Image: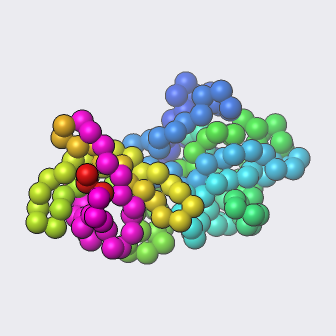
């Protein structure tokens, strides 16, 4: 375990359920969220933040509450993963991590594909029409059962929503800071 290289806990002490982190530390990407302990030996139920959960496979390193830990085991269980972190050997130690993000340094994050993005990369991007007309900024991503829904805050403080599907989203250019869309009829009304 190495605290010096990772995101620090807010007060240097375990947060547990009381003050759960919701945003990854600067320079880190959240790859999963600890929902609860599983069993008596320190195993964690984790909600992965990507379909493939590449970053939560056995042998990978993550940061939990500011400590670098290796994933010693990982297996699917219903809509989650059961993850064993090195050094977390009891239910009590696992309970201290409930509500925590599991994070990886941005440069170490494995992606599902080249058109795969993390929410924190998208929020704040300009949203424009194909003709370049500015509509606003992406302010939130709603994760639904089928397709994500993007929430845009307009320049006049209004909002509109659109599905993150290929018929609507024509291009995502993170380095250029914009998302180009062709909205469906009625989306901008």
Q: Is residue 138 above or below residue 130?
A: above
Q: Residue at x 88, y 47 (%)?
A: 40
Q: Residue at x 11, y 61 (%)?
A: 132
Q: Residue at x 48, y 72 (%)?
A: 112
Q: Which of 183 and 103 lies nearest the eye of the viewer?
A: 183
Q: Residue at x 75, y 58 (%)?
A: 82
Residue 85, image x, y percentages: 71, 53
Q: Is residue 174 above or below residue 35?
A: below
Residue 92 shows up from this direction: yes
In the figure, residue 51 lies in which quadrant?
bottom right
In the figure, residue 139 lies in which quadrant?
top left
Residue 99, image x, y percentages: 64, 39
In the figure, residue 19 lies in which quadrant?
top right
Residue 62 shows up from this direction: no
Q: Residue furthest top?
A: 11
Q: Which of 84 and 37 lies nearest the eye of the viewer?
A: 37
Residue 163 within the magenta-colored segment of the rendering: yes
Residue 129 within the magenta-colored segment of the rendering: no
Residue 35, image x, y percentages: 69, 46
Q: Is residue 136 above or below residue 60?
A: above
Q: Is residue 66 above or below residue 161?
A: above
Q: Which residues are magenta?
A: 157-186
Q: Is residue 145 left or right of residue 184?
A: right
């Amino acid at each position: 375990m190495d605290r010096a290289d990772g995101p620090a806990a807010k007060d240097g002490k375990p947060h547990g359920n009381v003050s759960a982190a919701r945003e990854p530390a600067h320079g880190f990407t959240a790859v999963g969220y600890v929902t609860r302990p599983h069993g008596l030996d320190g195993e964690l139920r984790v909600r992965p933040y990507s379909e493939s959960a590449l970053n939560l496979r056995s042998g990978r390193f993550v940061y939990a509450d500011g400590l670098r830990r290796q994933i010693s085991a990982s297996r699917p269980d219903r809509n989650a993963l059961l993850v064993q972190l090195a050094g977390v050997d009891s239910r009590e130690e696992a309970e201290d991590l409930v509500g925590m993000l599991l994070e990886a340094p941005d440069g170490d994050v494995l992606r599902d594909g080249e058109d795969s993005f993390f929410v924190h990369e998208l929020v704040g991007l300009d949203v424009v029409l194909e003709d370049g007309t500015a509509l606003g900024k992406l302010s939130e991503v709603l994760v639904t059962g089928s397709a994500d829904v993007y929430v845009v805050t307009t320049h006049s403080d209004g909002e509109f929503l659109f599905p993150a599907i290929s018929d609507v989203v024509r291009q995502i250019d993170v380095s250029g800071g914009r998302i180009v869309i062709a909205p469906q009829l009625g989306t901008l009304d």
